[in-house]
Image (cartoon, grey):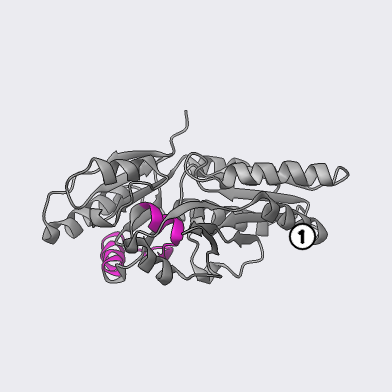
Amino acid sequence: MNKTLIITDTSSDIPIEYLEQDEFNVLSMIFNINGKPFCEGVDFTHENFYEIIPKREVISSFQIPAAIYIDRFRLAQKAGYENVLVITSDSQTSPMFSSAIEGRGMFLEQNPDSKLNIQIFDSMTYSMGTGLIVLEAAKLAKSGESIDTIISVINDLAKSIQLIVNSFSIRNLRADAPLDWIKKMANEITHPFPTFNIIESDAIELPIVKGDHTAFDQFFGYCYEALIKNKPPYAIGYAMRAKEARAIAILLEEELGYPPVAIYKVGAFSTYCAGRAAITLAFVGDNRKE
């Protein structure tokens, strides 16, 4: 039986109830805030970060150093794992993919006789879009599937993952955010309720008619339309807007006949990108194979 360890990071927003699984590790991202490093989940909580964002603190970088990956590879080898699969957020918007690549190269250089098979996978998405891929990989690893099978399955899954993100308040967006579609919202979009469908790094704007009393209903409509045809697994994330997120979850369960796989708090990376008022729907959409 193959023994595979899945490694991801806190940008995947995996809910706490899943974090005790042995099949995967979650690395904490490090944010440079006002010139000092702060480790997510150690030096600050989600709630701490929600308060930082509107104060316009200077966030100059976010990362996971290659040395941390090297250490996890060593621990995996010591624990008897044959394979390690690192699943990162979209490589176009976060540095974790390149850092993991660098860590793998340095580990193999330092351990030339190592037989540990290390694979790095770009999820091409973020938040629970990445999280859904990680959970599927962990399930396959637990059942003893080969690393090639796991990669094949999640490669197809990555071509199906979609996010619908409503920031609800354009005032909370940052023009220096790492995602191009967030920069577009912060710099170009004039209406107050920007909403996007995120598909493999691309963002399609979904129009929201101006008016606070209708923004929620329109966002729910987009979520419902995305799910009703195939009724796929879905998850709902939020920062400050817990009440609205839970209302979306209740309405979707009533209409679809099944609940979300998770209602989760978004972490620092997602909050930094989409703002602390955002609500996110992550789901398995149509497969976009070429």
Q: Report the residue at 30% width, 53% height from top.
A: 173
As shown in the figure, which amino acid type bears the numbered disc 1? Leu
Residue in view at x 67 percent, y 49 percent = 66
Magenta span: 244-273
Q: Nearer the viewer, residue 120 or 135?
A: 120
Q: Using the image as rendered, state which of residue 12 and residue 186 is in the foreground.
A: 186
Name the main secondary structure of what is drawn in magenta. helix
Give left or right: position of 12 versus 69: left
Q: Position of residue 279 (x, y in %)?
A: 32, 59
Q: Is residue 56 magenta?
A: no
**In the image, 50: left or right of 141?**
left
What residue did someone put label 1 on?
Answer: 75
Position of the N terminus, as image quadrant, is bottom right
Q: Quadrant of residue 81?
A: bottom right
Examine the image and state in which quarter residue 185 appears: top left
Residue 115 pos. (x, y %): 83, 46
